[in-house]
Image (cartoon, rainbow, N blue to C red):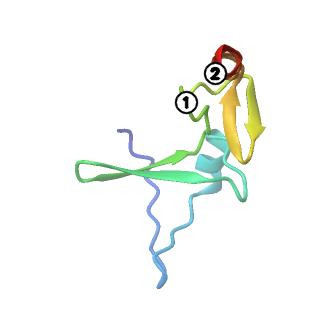
Amino acid sequence: MKSTGIVRKMDELGRIVIPMEIRNKFGISEKDEIEIYVDGSNIVLKKCEHGCIFCGNRKNLIEYSGKLICNECLKNIVQLKNKE
């Protein structure tokens, strides 16, 4: 891991501010979701990138009932439905 040299204090509610330079570098905007991981003794923050609920693919997604499905999995579902 590379240190940025930036240090922030946590507030009373456990919040920290991610510096604008880092947000810009990773394309993080207001209201974006951030995933939080633990890796040994490290806390890792990652911009949440949603993918297909079946295969995890992040391209050519269609939203159905609040869930994301890629075109390939959608085709497989249609094929299964047609076999019934």
Instruction: Give how far across and how far down residue 44 sits, in percent.
Output: 40, 49
Name the element at disc 2.
helix
Hey, which residue is sitting farthest left in the picture? Answer: 40
Q: Which residue is mark 2?
A: 73
The kind of secondary structure element at disc 1 is loop
| x and y percentages locating residue 39 in the rendered image | 29, 46
Q: Quadrant of residue 9?
A: bottom left
In contact (CB < 8 Å): disc 2 and disc 1: yes
Which circle marks residue 81 in the picture?
none
Q: Nearer the viewer, residue 19 or 79?
A: 79
User: Which residue corresponds to the image point at 66% horizontal and 48% vertical from the top-left?
Assistant: 28
Q: Which mark is residue 54?
A: 1
* Towards the viewer: 46 or 26: 46
Q: What's the residue at 58%, 45% (across, down)?
A: 48
Q: Which of 10 and 14 lies nearest the eye of the viewer?
A: 14
* Vertical relation: 68 (above or below) 84: below
Instruction: Give the answer, above or below, for where 74 lies relative to 33.
Output: above
Please say if 8 is above or below 46: below
Residue type at the position of mark 2:
Cys
User: Is 26 left or right of 16, judged from the image as shown?
Assistant: right
